[in-house]
Structures are given as C-alpha cells and as structure tokens.
Amino acid sequence: MRFYRSTLLFLLGTIPLLGYSQTDSTSLGFIPNYIELGGLANTDDHTPFWLQTNQFGTVPRSGSALLVRGGFQHSWLLSKPDTVKQWRKQLVGTSTPERAWRLETGVEIAANVGNSAQDVLLPQAYGAIRYGNWELRVGRRKQWVGLADSTLGTGSYAWSGNALPIPKIQLGLTRFTAVPFTKGWFSVLGFYSDGWFEKGRAVTSELKFHQKQFYGRIGKANSKLKLYGGFNHQVQWGGKSPYETVNGQMPNGFKNYMVMIFGGGKVDTVNATHFDNANRVGNHLGSIDFAFEINGLHSNWFFYRQNIYEDGSLYRLTNIADGLNGVRIRRKQANKNRFSISEIVLEGLYTKSQGGDTFIFDQRIFGKDNYFNNAQVRDGWSYFGRTIGTPFITPTFETIWKFPNFGDSFTSNNRVWVLHTGLRGTFSRNVEWSTKLSYSSNNGVYDLPFPNTAYQFSGLLRVQVRTGWLGGNTLLTGSVAADSGDLYPNSYGLMLSLRKEGLFR
C-alpha cells in the first residue's frame, strides 16, 4: 500500500520507549489460581458471533464442545524489606508509584473437546519483571489496546482481543504515569514490543510482528474532566511470501527493521521490490485515538473516537468518515440489591469509505484502502485464522458459505457499518447480568462487492451468579446468543460454566 513520509507516520517510530497496557491481568478476567468447567452447544454448526468473538481465540467457531479452563499467576517481591510498606500501599490503590522490584509469571490453559474441536490452547504463558510502573515482559498475555471500552463494546479497531495473544517481548508502563514536574496534570502510557506470528499460515511464513503505542492524558486521576489522545501502530514484516517479493523473501534484517519502525526511509534493496520501495517495509495499520472523560457526581462518562489508518488516506482525510465512535456510561451508586443497570456502552463502527473506490498510482489517487488485506501478506491481519482487529471484518471462510471469495485475500468483507449496544447490571447482590446487541450492514470489498447488502443481527445475554459452593469464590455463568440475518447462518447457542477461584493463596 502507498506510503507517504508524513510527519504523522514519522511520529509512530520516534516516540520514546514508553509503555502502554490498559489493564492488568486481573481486570482482563484472568484470576490467579482458578479452574473452570463448562459446555457449549449450538443449534447449527456455527457458534453465534458473540459467544466466540473477542474471547482471545479460546471458544470454538463451530460445533458443541466441553470446555476446560485453568489459570495460575504468582508475583514475588524482590526488593528489600524497607520497600514492602510502599509496595503494599500501591496494591490497595494509592496513587504513589511503587518503588519495588517484582517478578511475575502466569499460565492459562484452555482445552476444547468436541466433535469439531480438539484443541489445547495457551492464551497466557509469560514472565515479567517490574519496577515501579515499568514492566519488561516475555511471552503471551491477554491485552487490550486503544482508547475504547474493552468489555461491553465491540473491541478496538486494530486489536480487539478476538485472537490468541501474539507472543512478544514488551517494554512499557502498566498504568498511566505522571510526567515529572507536571504535578500529576499530564500522564502517559505506552509500550514498545516485537514478536512472532504462528507457523503454518495460509500464505506467509516466518512472519515477524512489531507493535508500539503512546497515549497521553491531561488531568489528574481524580479530575472531573480528563482529555486523552494517542496512537497504536502494528506491523507484519520480515517473513516469506510468494507475492511481491524477491525469491519469496520480504525485506528483513536490522536496516529494514529501522525503516519499518520509523514507517519510512531507504529500503535495503538486497531483497526489496518496487512494491517495497513505493510503499513501506511490511504491512502497517492502526488507529489514532482521542477521548475525554467526565467524572460526574452520579456517573462517569467516557467518549472516544478511533481514526483508522493503513496508508495515506487518513493523512489526506479522505477516509476520515471511517472509524469507531463510542460512549461508556458507568453509574456510581447502582442499587445492587435489586434489578439495576450499572453500565451502558453505545458504539458505531464505519469502514465503508476507505478513501474512495479509486486507486490510480500515477494520478496520486489513493483509495481502496482494503482494510486488513495486503498485497504481500495475503493471509492478512490475522493470527491462527482469526481477525486480530475488530471481529466485524470477517475472515473469508466465515462468509464463503454464501458470498464469493475475494481471491486468496484474508477477508472478502471489510466495508461495514455497525450499531452496537452493551449493557451490564444486577438482579441482586450476587447476580450480575450483561448483554451485547449488534446490527451490521456488510458490502464485501470494493473489487468484489456483495450482490446485495448483507444485514446481520447478533445478540448475547449472560447471567453470572456468585455462590458459596465448593467453599465459596465460585461463579456459575450461563450465556445464550443468537445470529439472525444474511451474513452468517441463523443459529442459537448456549454456554454454561462453573468456575472456582482462589485455589491457592
């Protein structure tokens, strides 16, 4: 895809090694020391959309299955005894950054056993060393990226939690951290990482992964108004592909690595093609995000916008209509003893512009951004066959039952709009419910549009009960979901699980 050496993309590579990780492992639903047993049943050989998407690739796409999950996480304090008091204060939520060294490791296993699923997966397997808010981590760990709601929403555009975490080495910050001499009024989050894609991809092999982020916040942690802004930047590069390459090898090596992280520069021509020189080293994508948060007396409001980039369209504002818009409202004093709504998320996703329907290189008209597809990386923005970004840009094999295949590209449907609502609340103090409701319009891709617009509804209702069974700390969860429309086969699904937490101290 066409690249312009703009100031915007230059900044993607020149940001310092600041880290960003929106949440720690516990807020990702990864409870230290747990075991879970569940079951999945569908009325059709298709698991409804909201039962299997944004689950870090652990729920089968089809068929019925027995689900077995287990996780272990432990942290060791490495600092001298005189730092323990400050470390403990940080754990209970004080704003003073901890000044202690810690070593942490975690493992999570997900086994699916059924007619169409015989998988044993490792959604998490990592080791990390921390000092203060800084962390150096190696391995796989669940992570959300970008300024957007990550539990009731559709997920961030570029990194939604839909696929298994990619193994990588990451240096960064674990939370917003105040910049010195700003008295807490300006804070930053960020990370810098490199990793590896899976073996056995459909088209490419030995594919490498690069990712970085930087986000800033204006306003103290307890301010009534906070402003946010920043970006995320992802690259697939350095692997082998039969398309647009010299002897099947995409540009790699240290020189091309530097060109890749800065988003531009002189390509090492040993294994570069005209495609590499006219575009960039690797397949680049991400979003530039803005948000503001209002902390009211009775509720908290979080408004966000993610602007999409894959080539020069955003720089020219020709695809400015595309992006994710959302608002999350959290009530502060919902009555947990009766039916209540404690959280609401409203989102709109639009990807139909893509800079227009025309791409003419010589006339400098650069439309047809063709999100999540790439001329070199034909298996696209995916990991183990699942979309890494928003799950509403669907892999071709999920729509081939009804719609034509767009060559050997990853997706045949990246021109969509989505209206989405997510709700959470309680029935009583021990019973929590949540729901996701999505309605989408799907038009295929510019070069192979669907014969007719495909409209699709997908919904989910989940109820979770905390019980005293098995000595307490036990969760009984039931989920029902449905798909109805033109994109997926009409289907209904049910998932039940029993989860015991806190097996060890």
Image (cartoon, grey):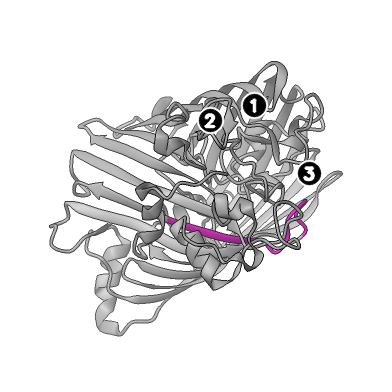
Q: Amino acid at mark 2?
A: Gln
Q: Which residue is mark 2?
A: 354
Which numbered disc, 2 or 1, marks the residue that appears first in the sequence? 2
Separation of residues labelled 2 and 1 (CA atoms): 9 Å
Image: magenta residue range:
200-212
Residue 327: which quarter of the image?
A: top left
Separation of residues labelled 1 and 3 (CA atoms): 37 Å
Q: Which residue is mark 1?
A: 446
Which numbered disc, 2 or 3, marks the residue that appears first in the sequence? 3
Residue 476 is at least partly visible in this image: yes
Q: Nearer the viewer, mark 2 or mark 3?
A: 2
Observer-nearest of 472 and 292: 292
Q: Residues within 10 Å of mark 1 (few under 14, many from 20)?
A: many
Observer-nearest of 300 and 427: 300
Residue 156: x and y, percent? Answer: 49, 40
Residue 473: x and y, percent? Answer: 52, 52
Q: Which residue is mark 3?
A: 65
